[in-house]
Image: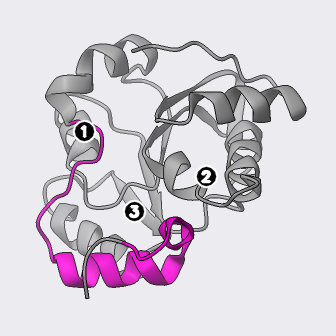
Amino acid sequence: MSLLPRTAEEFSSADYWERFFRKRGEKAFEWYGDYNSLCGVLHKYIKPRDKVLVVGCGNSELSEQLYDVGYRQLTNIDISETVVSHMNQRNAEHRPDMTFQQLDATQTGFESGSFQAALDKGTLDAMASEEDGALAGRMLAEVGRVLAVGGRYVCITLHLLLIKRRTRKNPSHLFLKPLL
C-alpha cells in the first residue's frame, strides 16, 4: 500500500488514516511545518493557560513541544485508533497531563464552550476533500461549538476560501484572520 491516497476523498476516510498510521509506524510526520516554523504564530494566539483542543493531532510532535514549553491543558483528538494509542504510550511517562482521544472531529462530545483555543494543522484540508465541503463544514461547526466565546481557532490550511465561505454560511463567534 502506498501512503498516498488513491483519491482526494480518501483523505477524509477513517480507514485511510488507520492504514496510514499502521504503515507509517511510530515516526512523527509533520504536515505544514513543525514547531520551530509555527511557534511565533502559535504563541501569539494560544496562551499557556488556555485549554486547547488539537484537532487531528496525528503523530506530530507539535503538542509535545507545546507541552514542553508550558502548555499543560492540551486535549488531542484523532480519528485513528492506532495513532491515539501510540501517542498515549509515547507521552504517558513524560507528559502525564496531556491526553489523546480517538474522536470524530465533527462530533466530539465535549461540552459547548469548553476550550479557549483549537489548533488544526491540516485536518480541515483532509476533511475538505469532498466536492461540496460538507464534512469540513461540520468540523468547523463543531470547533465553533466547543470554543468559548472569544476563543481562537488557529488553522494551518490551504483552504482559506473554504473557511471564509463556511463561516459566512454558518455564522458563529469565529473571527477569521489570515496569519501567514
- Quarter of the figure with residue 56: bottom left
**Is residue 33 placed above or below 60 in the rendered structure?**
above
Say which quadrant the N terminus sits in. Answer: bottom left
Residue 134 x, y percent position in the rendering: 77, 56
Q: Which mark is residue 127?
A: none
Q: CA distance from mark 2 to mark 3?
A: 23 Å
Q: Which residue is mark 1?
A: 67
Mark 1 element type:
helix
Pointer 2: residues within 10 angstroms few (<14), some, or many (20+)?
many
Q: Is residue 163 left or right of residue 158?
A: right
Residue 132 x, y percent position in the rendering: 76, 54
Q: CA distance from mark 1 to mark 2?
A: 29 Å
Q: How is the image coloured?
A: one colour
The answer to whether mark 2 and mark 3 are in CB contact below 8 A is: no
Q: Is residue 114 left or right of residue 78?
A: right
**Nearer the observer, 89 or 125:** 125
Q: Which mark is residue 100?
A: 3
Query: Which comes sooner in the sequence, label 1 or label 2?
Result: 1
| Residue 35 colored in magenta in the image | no
Mark 3 element type:
strand
Q: Which mark is residue 128?
A: 2
| Residue 17 colored in magenta in the image | yes
Q: Is residue 34 left or right of residue 175?
A: left
Q: Amino acid at mark 2?
A: Ala
Query: Which comes sooner in the sequence, label 1 or label 3?
Result: 1
Q: Which residues are magenta?
A: 5-33
